[in-house]
Image (cartoon, rainbow, N blue to C red):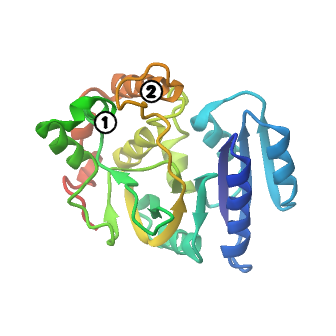
Amino acid sequence: MLSIIIVNYKNPPLLRLCLKSLAKTLSPSFKYEILVVDVASTIETRGIVSEFPEVRLLSFKDNIGYTRGVNEGIKNSDGEAFLILNSDIIPLDNSIEKMYGYLMENQDVGMVGPQLLNFDGSIQDSSFRFYGPMTVVYRRTFLGNLPWAKKELDRFLAKDMNRNEILSVDWIMGSAIMADKKAFQKIGFMDEKLFLYMSEVDWAKRFWENGYKVKYFPRSQMYHYHRRGSKGKFNAFDIINKETRWHIIDAIRYFRKHGISARLAKASGGARAKSFSA
């Protein structure tokens, strides 16, 4: 059985759309459960979840953050694997079953992510190489326009990657991640010191370090209403933007934990190749 954990933060219309899409696209013969972790819960959101009697609701009055939201969902789940979704995800037909089948058939894979699409059908960046400290700076300031910065950003965004192939990747965007429970029992929960950002990066790194592969799986496709909330209005360190501040703080905590050369570290046993490959 698969546990589908949806972390929602003040997004009632998209949550309803996500839940409707799951009901429509999942096969009746496929065994699953759905849990909604409602962060900074509202009456409107709770009312929407009540429209779907098969869905379990974990409601939190305070903004506990993405990372703890994921962990609370895992604590209350019963599946052999977890599919962690943001409420702005709409899966295509059979996408979840395909990803689950791939994960269960490949015991050396601990985490897998789908191909995320914009609503015009174009492919989003959803799998990446590990951050270097300057990656954050280049992505948040005008310095990203400099030639050497563009080279670093191309490395980070894996511009050389063929996004139509199954690939080993450093980490997967937290909007849609499927993780194996057996691997999780070895790796543990997401690090709650990372409130909103970087926790999926840290998690993927720990999967690699414990001998489990992280895979990008384009045979599974999902629409994603992507909004970079941490990106400042003027592409600078916009300290007024609360999500930008969270991103910077979480990045600092991540590099304190792993060191500034974290992106160069190899997984134990040499499981991760320097370049992406199947």
Which element is circle 2 on? helix
Task: Name above or below for residue 225 compared with residue 26.
Answer: above
Identify the mark at residue 35; answer none if there is no mark: none
Residue on which disc 1 sits: 139
Which numbered mark, 2 or 1, is in the foreground of this view?
Answer: 1
84 and 42: which one is in front?
42
Q: In the rendered image, which quarter contains the N terminus?
A: bottom right
Query: In this orientation, does residue 276 appear?
Result: yes
Place of residue 278 in the rendered image (x, y in percent of width and height, measured from the top left): 28, 68
Q: Is residue 205 left or right of residue 197?
A: left
Q: Residue at x 74, y 79 (%)?
A: 28
Q: Residue at x 41, y 38 (%)?
A: 202
Place of residue 92 in the rendered image (x, y in percent of width and height, measured from the top left): 57, 72
Three-letter code, disc 2 = Asp
Residue on which disc 2 sits: 250
Place of residue 148 in the rendered image (x, y in percent of width and height, measured from the top left): 12, 38
Which element is circle 1 on? helix
Three-letter code, disc 1 = Arg
